[in-house]
Amino acid sequence: MQLGLTGLWSIELRTADPGVVTDAAAELDELGWGALWIPGLGGGDILGDSERLLRATRGTKVAIGVLSIWRHQAEEMAAGHARLQSEYDRRLLLGLGVSDPAAAETAGRLYRPLADMGAYLDTLDHAPAPVPMDERVMAALGPRMTRLAGQRTAGVHPFMVTPEYSAAAREQLGEGPLLAPYQAVVLESDPRKARAAARGFLGAFLEMDHYARNLLRQGFTEDDLAHGGSDRLIDAVVAWGDVDAIGKRVHAHHQAGADHVCLHVVGSGSAVPLAQWRELSALNR
C-alpha cells in the first residue's frame, strides 16, 4: 500500500465532534496528505472511526496507528477490515501493537509479546477473510519485534524515535518493508515554549517501561528520561520550529531510510489543529 511521503497522526480525528472530523478529513484529502493515522487509545470503535475517515476522503489512506491486540479481537478486526477494504478501495492499513504488561493483565492474560503477536497474526491469516500481509503493520520498537514485523507484515510504525533509529531499523529490515515512523511536531520557534509543549504530551510516555527501554537503546540516559525529558531528548524526538525546520527532520528520516513519516501536531491549544495541518501541508509538495 502506497502511503506517500508524509501523513498526519491525530488523536483529534478520533475524539472530536464527528461532523468536525468529517469536514477536516475531506480538507486534508484535498491538501494531499498521503495518510491519516489514528491511535487505538483505550479501545472503542476503531473500525467505525476509521470508516468515518474513509467515507470523507477519496484518495488519502487511513491507518490505525495502532490498536492494542488486548482490546480488539482478531476475528472481529479481520471481518471489519475486509468489509472496509471492499467498500473503500482498499485504503485501510491495520496497525497492531502489544501495549504493555498492564494491558495484558487487564485482559486476563500473561504478557508474552512475541508469542502473543505471532498468535494474533496467525488468527488474521486464517480468518474467513484474511488480512493480507501488506495491509497490516506493527508498532515494533525492539529488534525481535522489528524482525517479526518485517517477516509477517508490511513493516513497522515506531513511536518516539530519531532519524538515527530509522537508519538502524532500515538496516535491520532491509529493502522492501515499510518504515513509517511517528514524528511529534510543535509549530513554535521559541525553545522554551516548544519544549514545554512537547513535554506536555510526551512526558507521560517516558515513564512507560517499553518506551523508556527503547529510548535507552537509542543512546539516551536515565537522566534524559527524568522530569519530562531533557532538552537533548526532547530536541531529538520532537521536531519544533517553523515548517522549514520540521521539513528538515522529515527529510532526515527519509534520508535514513523511512518511506513515510507521520506528523503529530502537539501543543496547538486547539481542539482540532486544522490551521497547523494546513501550514504543514507545504511539506507534501
Image (tube, rainbow, N blue to C red):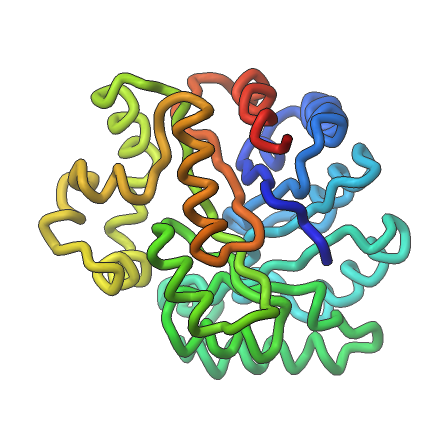
Image quadrant occupied by the N terminus: bottom right
Using the rendered view, name the quadrant where residue 10 is placed.
top right
Q: Note whether 166 is above or below 150 in the view shown.
A: above
* Number of marks: 0
Q: With 110 as the anchor, is 203 left or right in this view?
A: left
Q: Residue furthest right?
A: 87
Q: Residue furthest front?
A: 255
* Residue at image point 75% right, 70% down: 131
Using the rendered view, name the quadrant where residue 72 is placed.
bottom right
Residue 105, image x and y in percent?
40, 69
* Residue at image point 37% right, 51% down: 163
Q: Is residue 119 visible?
A: yes
Q: Note whether 107 is above or below 165 in the view shown.
A: below
Residue closer to the observer: 231 or 122: 231
* Residue at image point 35% right, 35% down: 201
Q: Note whether 209 is above or below 192 in the view shown.
A: below
Image quadrant occupied by the C terminus: top right
Residue 107, image x and y in percent?
48, 67
Residue 227, image x and y in percent?
14, 40
Q: With 118 as the anchor, is 75 left or right in this view?
A: right
Q: Note whether 221 is above or below 135 in the view shown.
A: above
Q: With 180 as the anchor, is 131 left or right in this view?
A: right
* Residue at image point 41% right, 21% down: 242
Residue 115, image x and y in percent?
48, 83
Q: Is residue 110 visible?
A: no
